Amino acid sequence: MNKDLIILVADVQQEKTIETLLDERYKSLNIRRMTYDIFRHPRKDPGVYKEAAHFLKSYQGEYEHALVLLDSEWAGAPGDAVYLRGTLQQQLYNNGWNANNAEVIVIDPELEIWIWSDSPVVAEELRKPWNSIYTLAQKRGDWLKGQPKPIRPKELLEAILRQQNRPRSSAIFQAIARRVGLTRCQDKAFILLRQTLQNWFPSS
């Protein structure tokens, strides 16, 4: 019997974030529980971009749906998020998937953008009050005044972790995914992910 979903991701942070959302937050996403497998590409974003269609082609008979995740910002990226998504979608369609059973989520610029909601949970998990986060972000130029999210989300996160001598860990992404209200995240890629899952796996 086929499983519901195969997911190809670029790194362990994406893997653990998606795993947490599907296993622990499916009710908040307004979807049903599903059977799925996540594969992490050893060559990260470039590997996902160049090889996703070929990789997923061999699994068509085993899964009802396919989901591809990658960041838009990586060395050698041939275009912006719109270009990457369009190109990958066409490659998937050329290899037997279609618009009803496959989707590409390109996170612009990278997964860290999902962390930066205005939730108090973010400050708690980063062990730094929001006013200190904003002060650091403004000083570094990572966050423009009046904007809902930083322009350099990854760099800001890493700067905060360096101050605390904390390693960059997927546990941080998991903790925030586990606790933050999902309606707070207004990132386009996250909204597309949520809508896609709701279309494929409605709660009732």
Image (tube, helix red, strand yellow):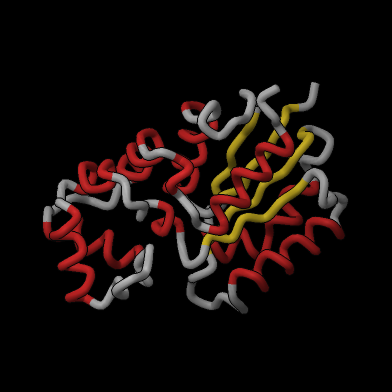
Which is more toward the observer, 148 or 93? 148
Which is more toward the observer, 70 or 175? 175
The quarter of the picture where residue 50 lies is: bottom right
Q: What residue sits 31% from the left and 43% below the top?
A: 172
Residue 119 percent location from the top left of the image: 31, 46
Which is more toward the observer, 106 or 58? 106
Query: Is residue 101 left or right of 41 when viewed as pictured?
Result: right
Q: Quadrant of the N terminus?
A: top right
How many numbered markers are drawn? 0
Q: What residue sits 75% from the left and 39% below the top?
A: 65
Picture layout, residue 22 above or below residue 158: above
The quarter of the picture where residue 189 lies is: bottom right
Q: Quadrant of the C terminus?
A: top right
Residue 73 percent location from the top left of the image: 49, 70
The quarter of the picture where residue 64 lies is: top right
Residue 183 percent location from the top left of the image: 48, 43
Picture layout, residue 67 above or below residue 35: below
Residue 154 percent location from the top left of the image: 34, 63
Picture layout, residue 74 above or below residue 131: below
Seen as rendered, the residue at the extreme front is 146
Query: Is residue 152 left or right of 140 when viewed as pictured?
Result: right
Query: Is residue 178 left or right of 63 when viewed as pictured?
Result: left
Picture layout, residue 156 above or below residue 20: below
Q: What residue sits 33% from the left and 37% below the top?
A: 175
Q: What residue sits 13% from the left and 60% below the top?
A: 132
